Image (cartoon, rainbow, N blue to C red):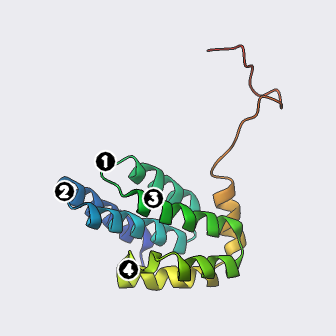
Amino acid sequence: LQRGDPQAAAAMLIRLGAFSSEAGLQRQMSKAYLGAVVVYLHAGRGRDAAAALGDCAAVPGFSPQTLALADGLLDACRGGDRADLEKFLQTSGILMEVDNAVARLAKQLAKKDLAALAEELGSSVQTLSLDDGGLDEDDLT
């Protein structure tokens, strides 16, 4: 984080999470994966944050509480409201679940371009509806 390379920092946190998982250190693993999500969000890479969360959630032993925190953070950023994001950061306990350097980045999220981040996060999940003609409910292929 000190070198200013968020991509490298997030990759390092993901590797730390993987090593922690192999060693059976679930708390450290969850902390590292949550840190990677925060780093990606701070860098304005909402799609990468959502993808990292999806990948990390599939790892056995990933804490459901940490998943809820990360999902809540993504939802707060997706909403694009600074006040809601700041309230989430203050009340959720997420700042106690990450390292100090990552907590500082999380606190700075409200000062970022939340509109651009919300747009990227909103477009990272596409829903399909049977009503728009996009899917045929009788087609099983």
Q: Report which residue position mark 1 lands on.
A: 60
Q: Residues within 10 Å of mark 3 (few under 14, many from 20)?
A: some
Q: Are marks 2 and 1 in contact (CB under 8 Å)?
A: no
Q: Amino acid at mark 4?
A: Leu
Looking at the image, residue 79 sits to the left or right of residue 4; the answer is right
Q: Distance from label 4 to label 1 (Cα)?
A: 27 Å
Residue at horizontal 63 percent and vertical 69 percent from the top: 77
Quadrant in which the N terminus appears: bottom left
Q: Which residue is mark 2?
A: 24
Residue holding disc 4 = 1
Residue 123 in picture, x, y percent from top left: 68, 53
SS label for mark 4: loop
Q: Quadrant of residue 36 in the image?
A: bottom left
Q: Position of residue 86 (x, y in %)?
A: 61, 82
**What kind of residue is marked 1?**
Pro
* Pointer 2 local density, CA inside 10 Å: few below 14, some 14–19, many at least 20: few
Q: Report if the CB atoms under discs 3 and 4 are less than 8 Å apart.
A: no
Mark 4, residues whose alpha carbon is within 10 Å: few (<14), some, or many (≥20)?
Answer: some
Are the residues flagged by discs 1 and 3 in contact, CB closer than 8 Å?
no
Q: Earlier in the sequence, mark 2 or mark 1?
A: 2
Give residue 49's position: percent from left, percent from top.
51, 61
Q: CA–CA distance between discs 1 and 3?
A: 12 Å
Q: Amino acid at mark 2?
A: Gly
**Which mark is first along the chain, 3 or 1?**
1
Label number found at residue 67:
3
